[in-house]
Every structure is written in C-alpha cells, then in structure tokens.
Image: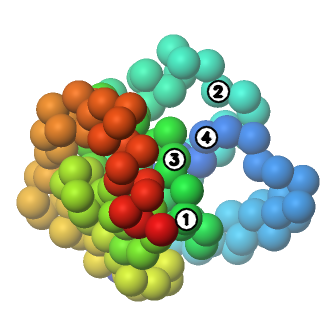
Amino acid sequence: NLSLDEQQKYAFVFAGRVSADIRNVFYKTIDNLEGNVTVVIKDEFCTYDFIDALCRAATAILMPYYVTDRSSGRLGYASYYGIPVIAPSDGLIGTLVNTYKLGVTIKDITSDNIRNACEIVCKMHFKVDNRYYLDNSLEAFQTQIQDSL
C-alpha cells in the first residue's frame, strides 16, 4: 500500500528464523510484493553482533504482534539503542510502549496503520529516551505486570 515515493523511502528487514507454521505464507507474501520497496530477509539465527549493527542502522523496530499480553526483547533493544518501536496499543506491550515512551502504538495491525506509523516516526525523527525503561528495577517491572492484569 505504499506510494512510489514511500517505496523509495523505506527498507524493511526481516531478521530471525521464519517459523515453519508461517514459512509458506511469509515467502508467498514477500514474492507478491510489487514495486520498488527494499525487503531484506535474514531467515536464520541472528547473532548479537548482527542485531547490534541492525539496530544502529534502523529508524524503527516493527512489532506487529497479535499476542500482546507478554513483553518482548525488542522493547529492550529499542530502549538501549534509542530507536522507537511501532507496536500494538493494547496488552502489556502497548502499556510498556506508552508508559516508557518507547514508540508509536497502533490500534489494529493493518498495512495502512503500519504505513501511517512509519510516516509519523520518520517525520518526527522520533528518538527514545532510554533512561526510563533501561533503568527499571525488577520490582517496578513486576508491579507493571501486576497492574496490567
């Protein structure tokens, strides 16, 4: 759903193993993409060095999760590297992103909502202030989980 101008602005990197239960759909979807958008796939275990390099180059981390009642290591990466996430607004993930100002949340995971969030992140030159999330204590994290239940 990206315009030609948007296709030239964005590159999407899918890093990590594609699980067997979605492999066929994932690759068929990628194969059906039309236009000039850059898509890079690293379908394998990713080392910390690779993740480090990827995070240093990224403008945002996309988290199109449908299951939102648990946390994600991507939030830690986003906070550590000071880059925003684009994540669902509900569940524990939405609560953590909004509480610690880790990025932009969207109500529904749709291509239009993801595109709009990408535009917001790019226009705002959004930077994450990592002091709040990274300096969190175990007790504060446990309280956050309890409060979200």
Q: Which mark is residue 46?
A: 2
Residue sitting at x 22%, y 51% = 100
Q: Which amino acid does label 4 sit on?
A: Ala
Question: Which residue in the protein does label 3 denote?
Answer: 72
Q: Distance between the residues labelled 1 and 3?
A: 10 Å
Q: How far apart are marks 2 and 1 (CA)?
A: 25 Å
Residue 117 is situated, as x and y percent measured from the top left of the image, at 29, 71
Q: How far apart are marks 3 and 4 (CA)?
A: 15 Å
Q: Which amino acid does label 1 sit on?
A: Asp
Residue 32 is situated, as x and y percent measured from the top left of the image, at 70, 73
Q: Mark 3 or mark 2: name the one nearer the start of the chain.
A: 2
Residue 113 is situated, as x and y percent measured from the top left of the image, at 38, 81
Q: Residues within 10 Å of mark 4 (few under 14, many from 20)?
A: some
> Would you say 127 lies left or right of 135 here?
left
Question: Which residue in the protein does label 4 denote?
Answer: 15
Q: Which of 96 and 23 is in front in this view?
A: 96
- State the residue lying farthest toward the left: 124
Residue 23 visible here: yes
Q: Nearer the viewer, residue 68 or 140?
A: 140
Question: Which residue in the protein does label 1 denote?
Answer: 69
Q: How far apart are marks 3 and 2 (CA)?
A: 16 Å
Q: Residue 137 carries which label?
A: none
- State the residue lying farthest toward the top: 49
Q: Mark 1 or mark 4: name the one nearer the start of the chain.
A: 4
Q: How crowded is mark 1: few (under 14 residues within 10 Å), some or many (20 or more)?
A: some
Q: Quadrant of residue 20?
A: bottom right
Which is in the foreground here, disc 1 or disc 3?
1
Residue sitting at x 12%, y 63% = 123
Q: Which amino acid does label 3 sit on?
A: Ser
* Rendered view: 55 above or below 109: above
Q: Mark 4 or mark 2: name the one nearer the start of the chain.
A: 4
Label 4: state its secondary structure: strand
